[in-house]
Image: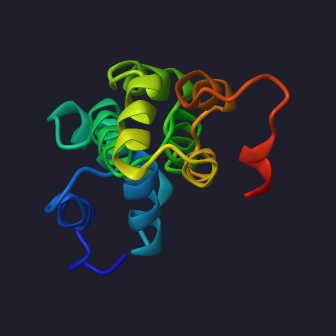
């Protein structure tokens, strides 16, 4: 590793503007050529001083995605893709406004139509949630065909 590639500096640059997951910072360090043992030590140090926190990252990321109209399934999948542990992701989801409340607000704003409900289904809202707030009867599958 070249001397100008201090692992703490590489990690700090990646965290300068917003939180990142541990896996994301680890990947950035690996791309910068930082040895695995040094990466582990660096990540541990960053966690210890509070610069790196997967829980904080997961809460912020989940809130941001929910604000942008995503349902719980999409948020959970995104957090998993970011390398967030399932338990940490579940805590972040539990801190959000309940999915039916978010879906109701979106349906009220965008209009109560099968097209809107289908859009929300594509954005990760559970079919059960959409049936509950949209008022679709059992067996109706217009969420799947629009």
Q: Is residue 137 above or below residue 110?
A: above
Q: Residue at x 46, y 73 (%)?
A: 31
Q: Position of residue 72 (x, y in %)?
A: 52, 34
Q: Quadrant of residue 117?
A: top right
Q: Which quarter shows the N terminus?
A: bottom left
Residue 4 position (above or below residue 75):
below
Q: Between residue 40 and residue 113, name the one nearer to us.
A: 113
Q: Is residue 22 left or right of residue 57?
A: right
Residue at coordinates 26% horizontally, 36% vertically from top-left?
A: 47
Instruction: Give the residue displayed 50% in from the left and 43% down from the top.
Output: 112
| Image coords of residue 42 (percent x, y) | 30, 48
In the image, taking residue 48 as reference, residue 44 lies left or right, namely right
Q: Position of residue 10 (x, y in %)?
A: 25, 67
Identify the residue at image location x=59%, y=37%: 73
Instruction: Work out whether 45 lies above or below 87.
Output: below
Query: From the viewer's perspective, is 47 left or right of 94?
Result: left
Picture coordinates of residue 29, whole percent (x, y): 39, 64
- Seen in the image, is 135 located left or right of residue 82? right
Q: Quadrant of the C terminus?
A: bottom right
């Amino acid at each position: 590793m070249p001397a100008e590639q201090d692992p703490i500096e590489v990690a700090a640059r990646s965290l300068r503007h917003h939180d990142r997951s541990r896996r994301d910072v680890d990947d950035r360090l690996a791309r910068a050529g930082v040895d695995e043992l040094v990466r582990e030590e660096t990540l541990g140090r960053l966690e210890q001083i509070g610069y790196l926190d997967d829980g904080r990252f997961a809460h912020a990321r989940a809130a941001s995605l929910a604000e942008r109209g995503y349902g719980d399934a999409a948020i959970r999948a995104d957090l998993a893709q970011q390398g967030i542990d399932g338990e940490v992701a579940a805590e972040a989801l539990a801190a959000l406004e309940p999915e039916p409340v978010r879906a109701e607000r979106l349906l009220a704003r965008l209009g109560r139509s099968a097209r809107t409900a289908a859009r929300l289904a594509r954005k990760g809202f559970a079919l059960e949630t959409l049936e509950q707030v949209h008022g679709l009867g059992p067996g109706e599958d217009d969420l799947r065909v629009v």
